[in-house]
Image (cartoon, grey):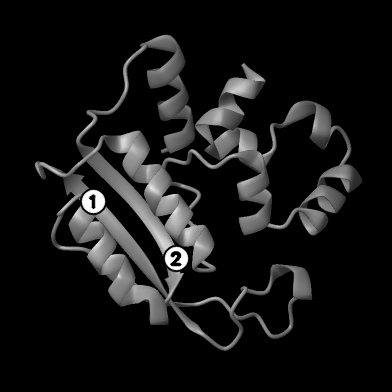
Amino acid sequence: LNTQLLKLIKEKVLKIDYADNCVLQDFIIPINKLKEAILLSSEMVDIWPIWMVPACLDTPEGPESIQPWERNTMYVDFGVYGHSDSPRYKGREQTLRVFEKFTLENNGYQALYAESLLEYDEFIKMFPQELYKKMRKSLPFCEEAFPTTYEKVSRIGRQRVM
């Protein structure tokens, strides 16, 4: 199932959006930031339980440009899924931007299958583009035929393409 295609259809064709109080987000954060992430989630959305799965991002044989910001560090896939009834909840978009900012400031990564409101400069900071652009250029008609990853996963990117 292509979630990006479904998002695009909902946004552009059906002109509907997910319920504002529905949160479906994953962030990959260094384990030493887990307490702060739990406190932030509690304050922003108060959704429980929280999905937490260890994630090792180091790839010793891989190029430097794809290594995590914090080497030899265990990361945690931090997932928040549910409906927020918290009186402190400020809406899906504002909450997502707070989570994205926290993730960037703490050397984390946003799961690209989740909703994203990252600006392009934030996206390329989180996901360096050198190897990606080199690969796209090397494949015949790739740049003409296919949107970039940013254009596929970001609402702002999808609006640029449409």
The residue shown at (37%, 56%) is 26
Q: Give the amino acid type for the residue marked by disc 1 in the picture.
A: Met
Dots 1 and 2: beta carbons under 8 Å? Answer: no
Q: Position of residue 131 (x, y in %)?
A: 80, 58
Would you say 36 lies left or right of 28 here? left
Above or below residue 76? Residue 10 is above
Would you say 48 lies left or right of 12 here? left
| Number of numbered discs overlaid on the protein picture | 2
Mark linked to residue 63: none
* Residue wearing tag 1: 44
User: In which image quadrant can residue 76 be found?
Assistant: bottom left
User: In which image quadrant can residue 161 be found?
Assistant: top right
Q: Nearer the viewer, residue 97 or 160?
A: 97
As helix, strand or loop, the secondary structure at mark 1 comes to: helix
Residue 51 visible? The answer is: no
Q: What is the quadrant of the N terminus in the image? A: top left
* Residue wearing tag 2: 28
Q: Position of residue 84 (x, y in %)?
A: 15, 43
Indicate which disc, 1 or 2, sits on the residue closer to the N terminus: 2
Q: Residues within 10 Å of mark 2 (few under 14, many from 20)?
A: many
The residue shown at (76%, 53%) is 129
As helix, strand or loop, the secondary structure at mark 2 comes to: strand
Q: Position of residue 140 (x, y in %)?
A: 89, 37
The residue shown at (47%, 41%) is 116
Q: Position of residue 30 (x, y in %)?
A: 45, 76
Would you say 53 lies left or right of 132 here? left
Residue 136 visible? The answer is: yes
Would you say 98 lies left or right of 80 here? right
Q: Give the amino acid type for the residue marked by disc 2 in the picture.
A: Ile
Separation (CA) of disc 1 from disc 2: 18 Å
Q: Nearer the viewer, residue 29 or 60?
A: 29
